[in-house]
Amino acid sequence: MAEDMNSYANALIQRLVLRLPKINPADDHLNVDGPATTSSSVIRSPDASASLGTLETLPLELLQHISEFLDFRAISLLRRTCLKSRDTVDTVLAYSSTGTHAFTALAALGKIGMMRCHSVGALYATLGSKECVSCEASGVYLSLPTCERLCYDCVCKSHAIRVAALEICGFTSAVADKIFSAYETWKETSEFAHSQDLIDFATQFIESMVHHRGNAIAYEDDWDSALEGLGIRPEKRQALLKAEHTALRMRGTAETWAKYMVGTIYSWLWSPEKDRSSAPTITVALPATPPQDHVMLYKGGAITHLQCVWPAWEPDDVKSGFNFGTLFSRQPIDFSPDASSLVYFAESKKWAHRYAKLNEDICNPIPAAVLHVAVPPSMNDKATRIADEDFQQLAFKCLQGRNRLEIRRPNLQPYVKASLLLGPVCGNSSAQVEGFTDPDQITVVKMGGEEPLQYAFVGDAMALELKNKCNGKVWIEELRREGLAMYREA
């Protein structure tokens, strides 16, 4: 039975498939969405003195043919090289026609990070065709991952689209196909077919591969091989293993990072955009200074996660403010033995930016951002400061899964009972700490030779106080739009 493409469960289809208007056979150009409203010329003028080098010896027809094998970004960069390249590229029908009449398709490809996956010629040929590649019915849908025209029925049962979704999440092509094929077989044969989603199946795959292939926990472990064993694509592995992310990477394992990137992107792909677009936010200039008598705190991450502080829907007559509960950290955490309601904020924007940059690299194509929240000093003044040996002992106990009753040291009791803590950032994962025998083995993260500090707001009461006192004082700044922020009025 064909699936309902307007249902929440099939938001994936809405994101990876674009409905196209019918092509008029009488038209001599693509009629995908009407002329672009902006000029296709580049902002930076080509260098008049530069040349195409040895390519200039080739006939124009051959240059045009070669250009059609470039993706849209590559051919746009070629166009900026020199006047000769601009003149040549502008004569490539596939480029000029697609850029002018298929702007919606290009924007959709860019949004899911697939602008470089298809050549200009292939995209032009697909958009210029009329039939579904599978059954020759009217192909009114464009499959963005496969660059094919499909009919409604073929979209709903497309194996390739769902495999491509797992690839976007971070798996290699072979592993994505293996996971989805096994999932389909399981759904057809298991009496519990409706008890598990595809992401649960993918998570179990990662866990099984850890069991068979091993994990990476310590700095000296072979992280690249471990991530490869979990089926993670080379570009995702390289992003996580960048030297600038080492300190943050060591706060997790190959397994936890693989689950994080796959789960985060999966949630984004499977969430209808209307859920977020309904939130009444506006774009404003980021305040240069905090509001009077307030201190700014920060949190970096995927923009889809940070936006959850704003309810996606609210009745016209109800102001529900903010929901900081969506930012609660999962156990085990280094500042509290068993608190299920704890949210961290960084004292330094640089540290929050570091988190955001990591998310931008490993969770591409999801935009990353920094959340700014203005907190009254009366709240921050309540913070209990923890450092040095006390911090090492508390982190050691908490990350080893001890509960409050098991933490009996008198010096740790003030921290266990505190509703707001201020302290350094632990540089170890819970898996690594499980193998430690002494609190002195706990390390503290350093950035530029200094120890970044973070606030830990513990408990539902603190979350409620944040909600009440910070209403109208939250901004979300996307990394790619520095200085601008999403904002919701109180």
Image (cartoon, grey):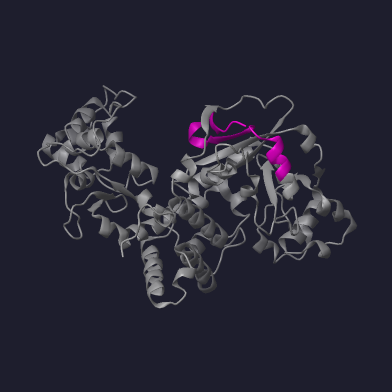
Residue 112 placement, left or right of 290: left
Residue in the picture at 87% in, 59% down: 409
Residue 121 on the magenta segment: no
Viewer-nearest residue: 472 or 185: 472
Q: Position of residue 265 (x, y in %)?
A: 47, 52
**Could you tell me which residue is drawn at 63 percent across and 54 percent down?**
251
Give the left or right position of residue 189, taking residue 137 as reference.
right
Q: Is residue 105 above or below residue 362?
A: above
Q: Quadrant of the C terminus?
A: top right
Is residue 478 magenta-colored?
Answer: yes
- Magenta-colored span: 464-490
Q: Furthest residue to the front?
A: 317
Q: Which residue is found at the position 81% from the left and 44% from the top?
A: 385
Is the residue 183 above or below the residue 12 in the image? Answer: below
Q: Which percent across, then down, holds residue 396?
A: 76, 59
- How far across and down, in percent of the image, does residue 313 sit? 53, 43
